[in-house]
Image (cartoon, helix red, strand yellow):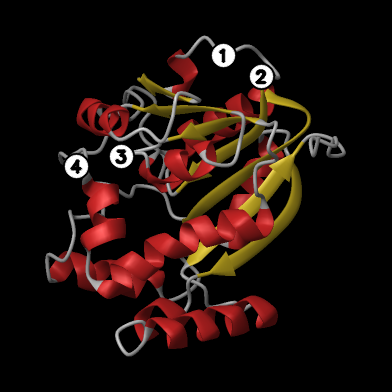
C-alpha cells in the first residue's frame, strides 16, 4: 500500500543494518546465502555486463559487493547508499581508484543527466514505497546516456519468495524484512508497469534464484547445474525478478 500523502519518503530501513552485512553474507554466510549472493553477480554477467569503457552507477550499493564487481570490469563506477556504516565499510574495501562511493540518496547527488552508460539497482526498490519507486525509475531514465541500459532486481512475490521471507523472519535468520525493510512487493507485471510509468523501455524481464540456491546445501556444483537448467527453461518460479531497461538502441562501448 502506498504511504499517506503526508508520510515522508523512506530514507532508510526501520532497523539498523550493519555496514558489512552484504559482504559478510556473500563471503561468510550460510552456504545458501553465499550462493544467492553469487547469483547476483552471475546475473549481471549474463544479462547486462558493463562494457570496459562504461561509466556505471550502482544505486543502493550497501557494503560494496556489487560495486567492487563492477569496478573490476568498467572504466568508472559511482556507488550510492544512505547507510553511513555501509559507505564507510565500502570505502575501506574499495576495489580500486575507479570506484567512487557517495553517502546519501541517489536523488541528492549532483550527477549530470545522461551521465551513465549502465545503472544497476539490485534489490532496493522493495525497500521503497511505490511512489518513491516511480521517482527512482524516473531518475534512472534521466541519468542514463542515450543507448544506456539499467538492471533492476527485486524479490518475485508471484513465486515462493513470500513464504521464504516469512520463514526467515519467523526464525530470525536475517534482519527482519517484512515492513521493517520490505514495504513494496513486485511481480513481473507490476515491475514492467512501474518501468513503463517512469518512461523506461522494458527490454527484458525474467526470474532467477529458484530452487538452485537451496541445492547448494548438498553441493555447490549441483546448485550451479540447477542454475543453468533454470536459466535455460526461464523458470517462472525464480525468487528474484530482473528487468533490463533502457531508452534507445544500445551504443557500442566495446572499444
The residues tagged by marks 2 and 3 sit, at their Cα atoms, a distance apart of 23 Å
Report the side of 60 relative to 131 (left or right): left
Question: Callout 4: few (<14), some (14-19), or many (20+) C-alpha neighbours within 10 Å?
Answer: some
Residue 114 visible in image: yes
Which circle marks residue 63 in the picture? 3
For marks 1 and 4 on the same chain, the one whose residue lies earlier in the sequence: 4
The residues tagged by marks 2 and 1 sit, at their Cα atoms, a distance apart of 7 Å
Q: Report the number of discs.
A: 4
SS at mark 1? loop
The residues tagged by marks 1 and 3 sit, at their Cα atoms, a distance apart of 21 Å
For marks 2 and 3 on the same chain, the one whose residue lies earlier in the sequence: 3
Mark 4–mark 3 CB contact (< 8 Å): no
Which residue, given by chain and number where applicable, does mark 1 sit on? 111
Q: Nearer the viewer, residue 150 or 99?
A: 99
Determine the residue positioned at 48% across, 71% down. Answer: 209
Which circle marks residue 115 in the picture? 2
Determine the residue positioned at 47% across, 64% down. Answer: 39
Q: In this picture, is 77 found above or below 20?
A: above
SS at mark 2? loop
Mark 2–mark 4 CB contact (< 8 Å): no
Say which quadrant the C terminus sits in: top right
Which residue, given by chain and number where applicable, does mark 4 sit on? 17
Mark 2–mark 1 CB contact (< 8 Å): yes
Mark 2–mark 3 CB contact (< 8 Å): no
The residues tagged by marks 4 and 3 sit, at their Cα atoms, a distance apart of 10 Å
Quadrant of residue 28 in the image? bottom left
SS at mark 3? loop
Amino acid at each position: 500500500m502506498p504511504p499517506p500523502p503526508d508520510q515522508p519518503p523512506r530514507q532508510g530501513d526501520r532497523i539498523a543494518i550493519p555496514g558489512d552485512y552484504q559482504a559478510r553474507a556473500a563471503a561468510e554466510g550460510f552456504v545458501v546465502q553465499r550462493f544467492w549472493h553469487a547469483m547476483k553477480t552471475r546475473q549481471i554477467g549474463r544479462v547486462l555486463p558493463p562494457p570496459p569503457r562504461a561509466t556505471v552507477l550502482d544505486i543502493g550499493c550497501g557494503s560494496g559487493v556489487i560495486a567492487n564487481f563492477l569496478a573490476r570490469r568498467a572504466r568508472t563506477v559511482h556507488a550510492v547508499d544512505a547507510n553511513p556504516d555501509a559507505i564507510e565499510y565500502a570505502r575501506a574495501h574499495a576495489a580500486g581508484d575507479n570506484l567512487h562511493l557517495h553517502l546519501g540518496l541517489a536523488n541528492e547527488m549532483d550527477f549530470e543527466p545522461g551521465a551513465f552508460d549502465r545503472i544497476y539497482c539490485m534489490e532496493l526498490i522493495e525497500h521503497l514505497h511505490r511512489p518513491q519507486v516511480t521517482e527512482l525509475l524516473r531518475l534512472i531514465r534521466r541519468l542514463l546516456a542515450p543507448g544506456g541500459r539499467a538492471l533492476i532486481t527485486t524479490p518475485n512475490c508471484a513465486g515462493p519468495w513470500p513464504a521464504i521471507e516469512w520463514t526467515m523472519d519467523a526464525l530470525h535468520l536475517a534482519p527482519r524484512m517484512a515492513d521493517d525493510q520490505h514495504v513494496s512487493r513486485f511481480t513481473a507485471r507490476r515491475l514492467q508497469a512501474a518501468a513503463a510509468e517512469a518512461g523506461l523501455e522494458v527490454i527484458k524481464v525474467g526470474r532467477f534464484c529458484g530452487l538452485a540456491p537451496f541445492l547448494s546445501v548438498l553441493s555447490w556444483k549441483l546448485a550451479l547445474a540447477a542454475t543453468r537448467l533454470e536459466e535455460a527453461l526461464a523458470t517462472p518460479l525464480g525468487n528474484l525478478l530482473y528487468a533490463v531497461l533502457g531508452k534507445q538502441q544500445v551504443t557500442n562501448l566495446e572499444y
